[in-house]
Image (cartoon, grey):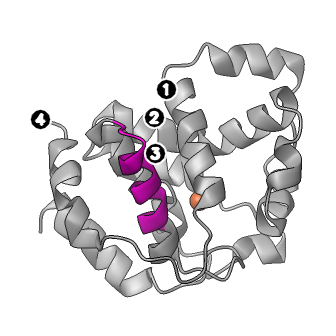
Amino acid sequence: MTPVDTIFEIFERRGAREYGGERVTQLAHALQSAMLSERAGDPPALIAASLLHDIGHLVHDLGEEPALRGIDDRHEVLGREWLGQYFVDAVAGPVRLHVDAKRYLCTVEPGYFDILSEGSVRSLELQGGRFTPEDVKTFEALPHAAAAVKLRRYDDEAKVQGLETPDLEHYRGVLEASLRRS
Ligand code: FE
């Protein structure tokens, strides 16, 4: 099986799961994130990262909704490791940083915290809370930090019940274009 087929299979098997108590499924959340990225005119790797940013939730064995049980599944680390096997850094890097991008925005952007969903607020605590001014500087210097902040904003928006999106097949091309060539 190719990596892209494996991803399709993961979404088929586990994509119907609820996304962090947000009333959309993991698959709907992924497709809405990718659609926002595509509409913003992002390069293929960032569209792919947007589609795959929560794959870490789908490749662990901690059961569904660990955050509701007070467990941080570290899905951004799992996602980076899993995606890094197959995809270029411009995919795996922003995925790794999309949780830190929330902690970053909570500190640097007035009003950002207030738009977070209940699920995102709950996970924020488990993930370490807002960044300190020192953390902010460290984050800004990281490769893929700016892309991660863009991805984060799609992530926050991609929780609309019943929104129509392209299907997974629509993104086969951007996924294939973002694979490592080695
Ligand atoms: Fe997400």
- Taking the image in four quarters, ligand 1 sits in the one at bottom right
Which amino acid type is marked by label 1? Answer: His
**Predominant SS along the magenta part:** helix
Disc 4 designates what residue? 181
Looking at marks 1 and 2 on the same chain, the residue that comes earlier in the sequence is marked by: 2
Tag 3–tag 2 contact (CB < 8 Å): yes
Residue 22 on the magenta segment: no
Which amino acid type is marked by label 2? Answer: Gly
x and y, in percent, of residue 48 in the image:
33, 49
Callout 1 crowding tier (Cα within 10 Å): few <14, some 14–19, many ≥20:
many
Disc 3 designates what residue? 80
Which mark identifies residue 177? none
Q: Secondary structure at mark 4?
A: loop
Tag 1–tag 2 contact (CB < 8 Å): yes
Tag 2–tag 4 contact (CB < 8 Å): no
Looking at marks 1 and 4 on the same chain, the residue that comes earlier in the sequence is marked by: 1
